[in-house]
Image (cartoon, helix red, strand yellow):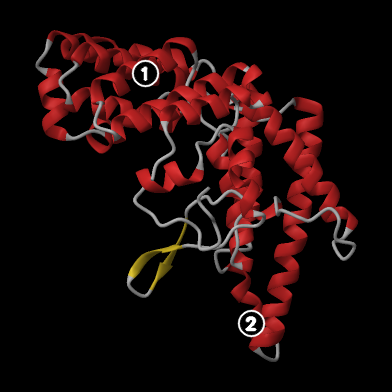
Amino acid sequence: MLMSMATFFNSYSNAQSIQHDYYVYYRLLNQAEIKEFEGDTIDALNIYIKAFNNFKGFETDYIHPIKLALKLKKYKQAYYLLRQKAIHTGWYSSDDLFHKQHMDGFLKSKYGKCYNKNFKKWLVTNESTYNIKYLQFISAINESDQLVRDGKLRILKPYLSNDSIYGEVRSRVISYIDSVNFLRFKKFTTYNGFPSRSQLGGKELSHTFIVHTFKYVNLDDFKVEQFEKEKYIYLDSLLRKQIRLGEFQPSSFAYCIDYSLSADSMTLFGYPIYFRGKDGIEFMNFPLIDPENVNKRRLEIGLMPIEIDRKIKNLPLPPNFILK
């Protein structure tokens, strides 16, 4: 059974983190998603509009509201959302993102004609916000991350006696690159500031390498290396701050931690994890670490309670979660 709307938003207002502005933004998006799930699409669209009236959204946040406005033939709202997305997050392909039939109807309207006249100007406006230094750094660090993970190390195989040794060498190289990338990221951020949405033309930081370096650790576990603890404390504090400022998404934060934890068949936030299996993409329903406090952790970073989220996504609750 879904938590009631009143209970949900009371729990938000009681959370200390709500004092920060962007938590209002996250709350509005969650509220709109719930309204739409309950069938109140007009109210949902109005709440989305309210969110984007007051905040610059993340790139992916605009997509669904635009689709909803086009589907409802609310062309004035669709025009507004398309304009906001273009100015604040840049390039997009309407053919790729939006249902062609719905988009064609919009383009025939007066708002669609105005959109066609102006969207290139909006995109140019966005391009002026790109910081090349930040883009180049993120590109370089992501390339090094992927270089050791996409098979390039196979060139070493002929020089090693067996697959076991190759596997050990590959593991050590990856671990080394992860550590180097973390230190490079920390140094760059210390001297230049966080490579945030505002520095990347509205795009969120590509967090591929963060997924591989940001691993949840139990700080009370004496077996965990000190470097790993220091790395976790630094990234945890840094990214939580950027969430509050609206520069890094709560969902990305949860994914970074839960994806690394999925290697041990568990998650901290209950973020849905998918893997490519024999029969296609498979959902892996891992148990939670400290299930009693999962919603407290989720509310602290702006995510809705897990039972509501899983209900909307039509996914089962984690096997060790107990609905109170």
The amino acid sitting under disc 2 is Lys
Q: Does residue 92 appear anywhere in the picture?
A: no
Q: Position of residue 46 (x, y in %)?
A: 32, 16
- Read off the residue under disc 2: 157
On screen, residue 191 versus residue 21, left or right, reads: right
**Residue 316 drawn above or below residue 99:** below
- Read off the residue under disc 1: 47
On screen, residue 94 versus residue 127, left or right, reads: left
Quadrant in the rendering for residue 116: top left
Q: Quadrant of the N terminus?
A: top left
User: Quick one: which residue is furthest to the bottom in this view?
Assistant: 161
Q: Nearer the viewer, residue 118 or 318?
A: 318
Q: Residue at x 60, y 16 (%)?
A: 21
**Residue 65 drawn above or below residue 279:** above
Q: Position of residue 42 (x, y in %)?
A: 24, 20
Q: Residue at x 30, y 15 (%)?
A: 119
On screen, residue 100 versus residue 126, left or right, reads: left
As helix, strand or loop, the secondary structure at mark 1 comes to: helix
**Residue 131 drawn above or below residue 142:** above
Residue 213 is tagged as none
On screen, residue 133 versus residue 29, left or right, reads: right
> Mark 2 vs mark 1: which is more N-terminal?
1
The amino acid sitting under disc 1 is Ile
